[in-house]
Image (cartoon, helix red, strand yellow):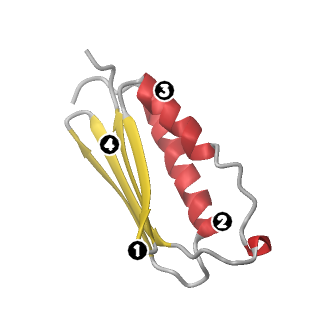
Amino acid sequence: MEDIDPDHMTLLGELLNEIAHNIIRHCPAGCEFDCSVMLHDDVAEVTQYNSVTHPADKSETAVSTHMGLGLCRDRLLHIGGMLRTEVEDGTWMLYARVPLSHQT
C-alpha cells in the first residue's frame, strides 16, 4: 500500500459518519441494515444496505436536505473516487470507492 493521504482517510470517516446518521434518520424502526468497508489496492470500498419505507404522511419522514451524500459524492469525484446509490424493491443500496492515496 502506498502512502495513505490523511485527507482521503478523513473523507472516508466523514462518509461513514453520514451513512450512520442516514441509517438513524431514515431506517424504519427495527429494520435490518448492513455496512461494510473493504480495504485493498490503496482503495476503500464501502457497501451499505437497509430497508426503506415510503410513508404516505410526510410528517413521518425525518427532515433531510439530501445534501450530505451529494457533498460526499462531489468530494469523492474530485479525488478519483465514486459514490452510487439506488433503491430497489424496498432496499436502499450504497456503493462508494474511496482512493486512500493520491491517484497517479
The earlier-in-sequence mark between 2 and 3 is: 3
The earlier-in-sequence mark between 2 and 1 is: 2
Distance CA(mark 3)–CA(mark 4): 14 Å
In percent of width and height, residue 54 lies at 60, 74
Instruction: Name the quadrant of the N terminus.
Output: top left
Q: Amino acid at mark 3?
A: Asp
Q: Which residue is pictured at 36% across the width and 32% down the height? A: 81
Distance CA(mark 2)–CA(mark 1): 20 Å
Q: Which residue is mark 1?
A: 89
Q: Amino acid at mark 4?
A: Ala
The local crowd at label 2, few if under 14, some if 14 to 19, many if 20 or more residues have their Cα within 10 Å, is some
Distance CA(mark 3)–CA(mark 1): 36 Å
Q: Which residue is mark 3?
A: 7
Mark 4 and mark 1 residues within 8 Å of each other at the beta carbon = no
Q: Nearer the viewer, mark 2 or mark 1?
A: 1
The local crowd at label 3, few if under 14, some if 14 to 19, many if 20 or more residues have their Cα within 10 Å, is few
Distance CA(mark 2)–CA(mark 3): 27 Å
Distance CA(mark 4)–CA(mark 1): 27 Å
Q: Nearer the viewer, mark 3 or mark 1?
A: 1
- Residue 24, quarter of the rendered image: bottom right
Please say whether residue 10 is visible from this viewpoint: no
Q: Nearer the viewer, mark 2 or mark 4?
A: 2
Q: Amino acid at mark 1?
A: Asp
Distance CA(mark 2)–CA(mark 4): 25 Å
- Residue 11 lies, with reference to residue 54, above or below; the image says above
Q: Which residue is pictured at 58% across the width and 72% down the height? A: 27
Q: Amino acid at mark 2?
A: Arg
Disc sitting over residue 44 in the figure: 4
The earlier-in-sequence mark between 3 and 4 is: 3
Secondary element at image label 1: loop
Q: Which residue is pictured at 71% across the width and 55% down the height? A: 64
The answer to whether 54 appears left or right of 6 in the picture is right
